Image (tube, rainbow, N blue to C red):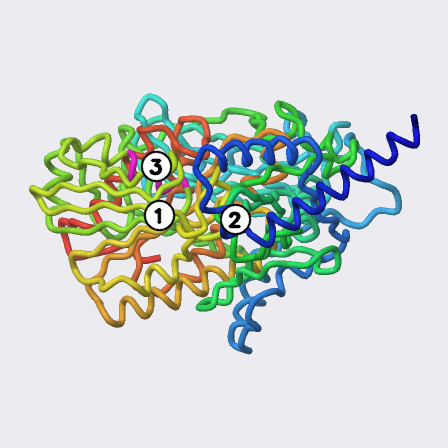
Amino acid sequence: MCRNLSKYALVFIVLALSGLIFLLRNIHTVENWNCHTISALYQLQSRIQSSFIQVNLPTFYHNRTFCAHLGQKPSPEDELEERYLLDSISWPGPPPRSTPTTLRQTSDPIHSLFAILPTNEGREWHVGDQLEALVQMHDFQGRPKRYGGDFLLARLHSPELGAGVAGKVLDHRNGFYSALFPLLWVGSAQIEVTLVHSSEAIAVLRRLREERPDRVFFKSLFRLGFLSETTVCNMCLPPDQQPLCNYTDPYTGEPWYCYKPKVLSCDTRINHAKGGYLKHLITNKEALLFQSGVNIKVRIHASGPDRINVLPPRKDKVEVESSSIKPEPIKLEPSGYYYEDSWRPLSGVTMRQFNESSAITQCLKNKVINMYGDSTVRQWFEYLIAFVPGLKEFNLHSPKNVGPFMAVDSTHNILVKYRCHGPPIRFSTVMSSELRYISNELDGLSGGPNTVVVLSIWAHFSTFPMEVYIRRLRHIRRALVRLLDRAPGTIVVIRSANLQALDQEVSLYNSDWYSLQLDEVLRAMFKGLNVLLVDAWQMSLAHHFPHALHPPPAIVKNMIDMLLSYVCPEKKRSQRI
């Protein structure tokens, strides 16, 4: 009986192989079968794949990744700029130790304190003065820290007045920090200092950024007829594990790769999607550095009063002679502040209030607004179509929250468009045909005084080495220079990064420290170019609402008012980056 079973099994295998060979050789004929047959075969094949095939993730070597060095070789000038940018965002780390650091030796916001320092005139402050608080960090044993590198945020605010301004934090690298604030309104002003991450946690985040660009992974579906395969994709994949499909952009040289399917060819790729987040990236001891309510975004208390009363500006300000060895005061240049919950920019354009939809319609009349980037600028598109009844979204049958999207007001000749930036993009599913790099899209614009370009590109680059982000911004900058050369009247507005809610998991992929570093590079690279900035970082830091990746409507409204004030200014002045 066993012999008969073996003989039947052998016959079955031969028949199955013959059938497979027949199907592969007659694939074009198979594709012409009726829809019901194809659907049944596809469902069967999908069940088989889901039962026996799983997406294998690549194994990365735990050292400095080659990811940053992929793509076109930079010119000597680009390499020089890159070194300058990386030096400008260098962050002090904990000193080397002979034994591993324990949680008890790391920064503890509960044991740490800050104190308001008096001015030369005592404890009297006027509008136009500068307020300083000195922060001293302690560890969980209550001992003073002797080195810097902690990530602190500071703001000055008045809940009664709906006022707030971002503070500037200086690291003295000895456990002490200065929080500096401009005094911009009369009345109560309260200091708030927050530990976002300890210096020990920052060291972990830095290592992950350099060594684990795979901690967010992507995938693509390949399909031909009823056959389909899914493989892992990323900007950098170890080339020695299996053959790669190379999807490097021919115009910019931006690299992107997928593992080659086992059966199908590389040109059968139909979409791109976020695959997921890798787990178990840090040790149990390192995980203690990322505890909500313990050492992630926890307030530091004052050793005395935490608020002052600000008096009106001095009528006759007398300069107080100071010692020759006293350092010059730090010049504070906040982009703006809130008063009565309305953003008031401190330089450039006068902020207008667009409280009525008719005012927005009048501002955007005869204009084309092109929005490119991540979901934080898609939020602006959604705000406009929700607030302005005349803007009707045109159904492009695009996936929800992915796009591309388009809205039209034919009566007033307004066109608003949104398109996501090219990979890496962590959206659910984007069709391959809709994956576009911003620089290529900008090269396709005619531009002109009735063209507005809005860019926001930062949130999806936090898991990659900084060199990757610098390269992407360099391509966008060159495309903007070309656009402004051929159409000088084009209005270009860049939305900066913003703060967001953090827990342990979010911190490892999208920490505010990553966003801060990206934001500083973005500002430096577009400085001096004829572009305008909506400072989402300071607008989210200065406001009393909790931090969120997608800020609440009150903050978005202020951002939109800032955007429209650039498009339709009261005076011919502008806030350049």
According to the image, label 3 marks what residue? 379
Cα distance between the residues tagged 3 and 2? 36 Å
- The residue at which mark 2 appears reads as 224
Number of the front mark, 3 or 2: 2
Tell me, yes or no, whether the highlighted magenta stretch contains residue 278: no
Kind of residue at disc 1: Arg
| Crowd around label 1: few <14 · some 14–19 · many ≥20 (10 Å) | many
Is label 3 in a helix, a strand or a loop? helix
Say which quarter of the image contains residue 217. top right
Quadrant into which the C terminus falls: bottom left
Question: In the rendered view, does 458 fall on the left or right side of 448?
Answer: right
**Residue assigned mark 1:** 419
Nearer-N-terminus badge (2/1): 2
**Vertical placement of 357 versus 567: above or below?**
above
Label 1 element class: strand
Q: Earlier in the sequence, mark 3 or mark 2?
A: 2
Residue located at (60% from left, 36% from top): 45
> Is 372 on the left or on the right of 273, as rendered?
left
Crowd rating for badge 3 (residues with CA inside 10 Å; few <14, some 14–19, many 20+): some
Q: Amino acid at mark 3?
A: Gln
- Magenta segment boundaries in residue numbering: 375-382
Horizontally, is 542 left or right of 468 in the view? Answer: left
Label 2: element kind: strand
Q: Quadrant of residue 240?
A: bottom right
Q: Position of residue 161 (x, y in %)?
A: 30, 25
Q: Alpha-carbon neighbours of circle 2 within 10 Å: few (<14), some, or many (≥20)?
A: some
Dot 3 and dot 2 residues touching (CB under 8 Å): no
| Residue at the right extreme, as displayed | 2
